[in-house]
Each structure stands twice: as C-alpha cells, then as structure tokens.
Image (spheres, rainbow, N blue to C red):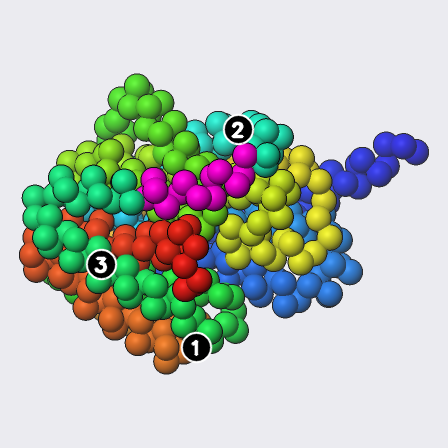
Amino acid sequence: MSILPHLFSMLEILLGTLIGVVLGTISGIIPGVHANTLAGILLSLQAALLSVLGPVALAGALFAALITHTFVDAVPSTFLGIPEADTSLAVLPAHALCLEGNGEEAVRIAALGSACAMVVAVPVSVLCFLLLPAFQPYFDWWIGILLVASIGYMIVTSEAPGWALAIFAASGILGAFALHYTFLSWHTLAGGSAILMPLLTGLFGISVLLVASQGTLPVQHFSGLRIEDKAVIKYSLLGTGAGIAVGWLPGLSTASANGVLASFIGYEKDRRTYILATNAANTANAFIGLAALFALSRMRNGVMAALAEIPLPSMGELMIVGILAACAAYVITVRLSASAWRLNGFDSRTLNRTVIAFVVLLSIALTGPFGLCILLLAIAVGLVPHLVNIPRMYCMGAIMVPVMLYSFGFAWI
C-alpha cells in the first residue's frame, strides 16, 4: 500500500512533464511568444486546473514548459530572425548561419548548448540552494559594479567608442522608460514582463529584417557540427556559468548574460561558440531560477511568479520534471531543425513581411498602444547600428541600464 502514493506522485510528474513539453514546444515555435505568456494563461485557469491535474502536475507543466521553451525557441530565432528577451543577441549569428544555408547546424548547436547546461546546472543549482543564501546581501550590491565594468570594457574596445556609448545610452534610456511605465501596457496574457517583447523585438528583430537582403532563402543543408569538442566543453561551461550567475543575482536576465558573453566571445567572428554559450546560459538560467525561488522566495521570471501562486511540490520533484523535459526538448528541437529543407527557395521578402506583421499584431495584442509606441522607438534605435556599421550588442543597454539603476538603489523600475 505504501507504494501507491509514490506511484501516484510519479504519474503526476510524468503528466505535468508531458503537458509542459507540448505547451513549451508550441510557445517555442511561435515567434514572439514566451513561456511567461503560457504561465499567465495557466495561472488564470488555476482553480480549474488544480482540481483536474493537482498541484504537482500543474507546477510540473509550468516548469517543463519553461525548460522546453529554452530549447525550441532556437528554431524561430534561427530561421525567422525574431528574438525574445532570452535570445536577443544570439539571433544575429544564428540567423546569419541560416542565410548561409547552415540553419539546421545553428539549431543543433543551440540544442547542444542547452543540453550541456542541463547536465551542469542541475547539481550546481542544488549547491546554490544549500550554500548561497547567507551571502545574498553581498551579491545584491556588487552586480551593478560588474555590469558597469563589463559594458565599459565593451565600449572602450569598440572600433567606434562614441557611437557605441551613444547607442548603449539611447537603448538604456528607452529600456528604463519602457520598464518604468510598463503599467501603461495591457497585461491580459503575458504579465508585467510583456513590454520586453516589443522592446527587444524592435531592437534585435524587426530592425534586422527591415534591412535584410531580399530574394529566396538559400538551400539549407547539414553536414555535421563544425565546432570542436574542446570548444563545446569550454563554451558550454562559460555559458552555463553566466546563466547561473544572472539567474541567482537580483534584477538580471539571460539577456544580461548574453551581453556579458559578447565581451568574451566575438559573435560576429565566432558564431557557433556564441550560439552554444548563449543557449547554455538560457537553459541554466531556468534551472537556477527554480533554486532561487525555493531558497530566497524571489521570482526571476513569469513562470516562477506563477509557481509562487500555487501549492508547490518539492524542489527535487520539479528538478526531475526539468530533466525529463530537457531530454524530450532536445529530441524535438533536433527533429524540427531537420525540417529546414522545407524553407528551401522560400521568398525571404514575403517571409520577412509576414513575420513583421505577425509580431506587430502580437505586440498590440499583448501590450496595447503603449507597446506599439515602444516597438516603433525600438526599431528606430535598432536601425542605428546598421547605419553606422557597429555591432548591435550595444543595444543591450535596454536591459543593462535598468538593472544598473536597480542595483544601485535608484527606485526607477
């Protein structure tokens, strides 16, 4: 008889994982949609879902959807060039590889980075849960100093420091404005973080598509991963470390990790390792976010905020869900990348216009007129790097400046 409760709990875990993998795959392949959007929808149906699924399955579905999304979102980022808050900078080298006919390789490298992160992030998250809460007050203050040092190094070493500083400052002011007045946007589906969607899509998505070359997409082919084993180990560990750091420290996101990684990895010259590292950071951030929720009661993203609103199972049960979801998501992502040949010869102008129209409509649906205003301003700022021929990574000021203000105690956000 004592086996029955454990068996029932395992069935709930499997059910939650299955539901979450399906939902995460759906959100992952739709450009501009984040797992936070699904979390908002599921949370609005909390009472009904709890009575049907139970707390373990519902919590498992939320976390599995988040983990799955960190894998699958590499597909639209690569082939459509539309970013999310977690994939903004990684889109640039991934989409560039797609335009060279290597889109499937880019997606497989991204999936490999996420898989490697899962292997490392799970045990490290447990260690952080056990050891780091006592040191949290020191971490809270130093993060602003680290960000200032990182962006200062990137600007000083730029080929055009003046333009780099100007773009960083302009995007930072826009980001601080958007986040400070986020209450002006609609939050029907995606919660308070919804304003990041038009902000980062304008800076790194539509502004890229507007100046993209026209014609047909090149033939997509796959002839293996052109990245050395040593590089896989080195850069997946680097990305995982960055993801864990920003996931534990206050006010940061994977987008911040991408900006820091860009100061160590030249994403224009070393595209494959940058894709590997940033996707490792994305997945690691999801796992460490769960540890931060249990250890510090801090919600690092919309999914964690939704989990905090329902009866939580144990951290161990949700980690099991995350591992199972990661394994399933890796297979799904690789299978989706193998369908890249269906885009062979597709008219890129039609594709770009369709994606732009969809994202604009989605921004209006999620954030209303205020979100549309932010989208237009972000597109204008996002076009400047192309016009002055400098890397687009300095637009990460939209995320980094608000985090600096928060870290130094300015009550702006």
Q: Which residue does the numbered mark 1 point to in the structure image? A: 184
Pointer 1 or 2: first along the chain: 2
Q: Quadrant of the N terminus?
A: top right
Residue type, label 2: Val
Badges 3 and 2: C-beta atoms under 8 Å apart? no
From mark 3 to mark 1, how far is it between C-alphas?
Answer: 23 Å
Residue shown at 21%/51% (left/top)?
Answer: 394
Residue type, label 1: Leu
Residue that protrudes farthest toward the top in the picture: 230
* Residue 140 belongs to the span the image colors magenta: yes
Residue shown at 28%/64% (left/top)?
Answer: 173
Q: Which residue does the numbered mark 2 point to in the structure image? A: 124
From mark 3 to mark 2, how far is it between C-alphas?
Answer: 35 Å
Q: Secondary structure at mark 2?
A: helix
Q: Label the magenta part by its dominant secondary structure.
A: helix
- For residue 150, side relative to residue 284 (left or right): left
Q: Which residues are magenta?
A: 135-147
Looking at this view, is 352 or 273 the one in front? 273
- For residue 141, side relative to residue 206 (left or right): right
Residue 265 visible, this angle: yes
Looking at this view, is 367 or 230 the one in front? 367
Residue shown at 41%/59% (left/top)?
Answer: 410
x and y, in percent, of residue 79 in the image: 28, 51
Pointer 3 or 2: first along the chain: 2
x and y, in percent, of residue 31 in the image: 37, 59
Pointer 3 or 1: first along the chain: 3
Q: Which dot marks residue 169? A: 3
Q: Secondary structure at mark 3?
A: helix
From mark 1 to mark 2, how far is it between C-alphas?
Answer: 39 Å
Residue type, label 3: Ala
